[in-house]
Image (cartoon, helix red, strand yellow):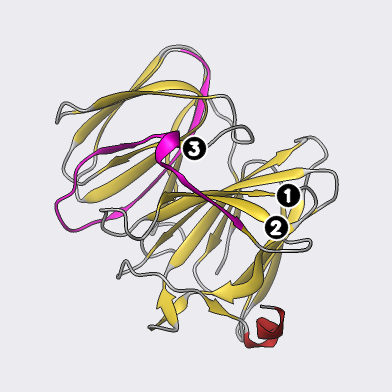
Amino acid sequence: MALRISVLKKNGFQKKIVSPKNSDLKFLSFSYYSGSGKRIIEEYTENEEWLWVLLSGRMKMSTASGSFQFMERKNVFEGKPVSFYIPPKLHYTVEIETEAEAVAVSTSAEGNFNPVFISPDSIKTTRAGKLNYQRTIFNILPQEFPASKIIAGETIHDTGHWSCFLPHKHDQDNMPEESKHEELYFFKCEPEKTGFGMIRIYDETQDISFPILTNDLITIPRGYHSVGLIPEHKLYYFWALAGEKRQFQRHTHPDYLKYE
């Protein structure tokens, strides 16, 4: 069942706030860093692949293979994402010297891949939707990216608009019409104090709606879903998907096909 979790801005690294051990997700885990001052995080990926996405501030990512990169970002509403992909069986270090905020997703992985710094210049940007459901999409890890399972990106609503419209799902292995991928969203509203949205997740067995506030994390193990936002505000969300197969295909609710 879908979950809504308010991710607190604790000072430090909160590893696997959501994971297959504490949710209905079978693959994805979500971690979060927020803090100020000097901090070093040392990790080993074991049998997982990891994607770190910097939300604001500055940090240095380095791996035992010798790759490293300084990452810097003002905030999620200005400019493209800056990210770092880390494959299985690799030691890595995150070094922070000033205030910073970041998210990380991970999942079990097979195959041999290389660590990759995903610069803002390399990010493919697309505009989607029409009328009052237009948004900008930044594809961080598209399905053609050399990775095992993670597909990820960011979406920024136009002010007061909807997204994930037309309502769609991806919970059946029925290619080429639909792939089986679970998903999670992590949200930011601007202005934060007054901003909020709504998400509906539903199918023939469930119908769940959640309010959306800044730092809300929503899991979507299955079901159709759409996201709405109040006027005069902006909405950002980081999204990540994972499944047994990498190829992805969404399935639009048949009642909405007339709006395509």
Gap between marks 1 and 2, in whole Å?
6 Å
Q: Point out which mark residue 81 bears.
A: 3
Tag 3 and tag 2, C-beta contact below 8 Å: no
The residues colored magenta run 98-127
Residue 190 seen in render: yes
- Image location (x, y in percent) of residue 217: 58, 50
Question: In the figure, 8 relative to 72: above or below?
Answer: below
Reply above or below: 58 against 88.
above
Q: Name the residue under label 1.
A: 158
Q: Count the marks: how many?
A: 3
- Callout 2: helix, strand or loop? loop
Position of 150 with respect to 53 (left or right) is left
Category of crowding for the residue at label 2, using alpha-carbon neighbours closer than 10 angstroms: few (below 14), some (14–19), many (at least 20) = many
Reading the chain from its start, which is encountered first: label 3 or label 2? Answer: 3
Q: Earlier in the sequence, mark 1 or mark 2?
A: 2
- Where disc 3 sits, the SS reads loop
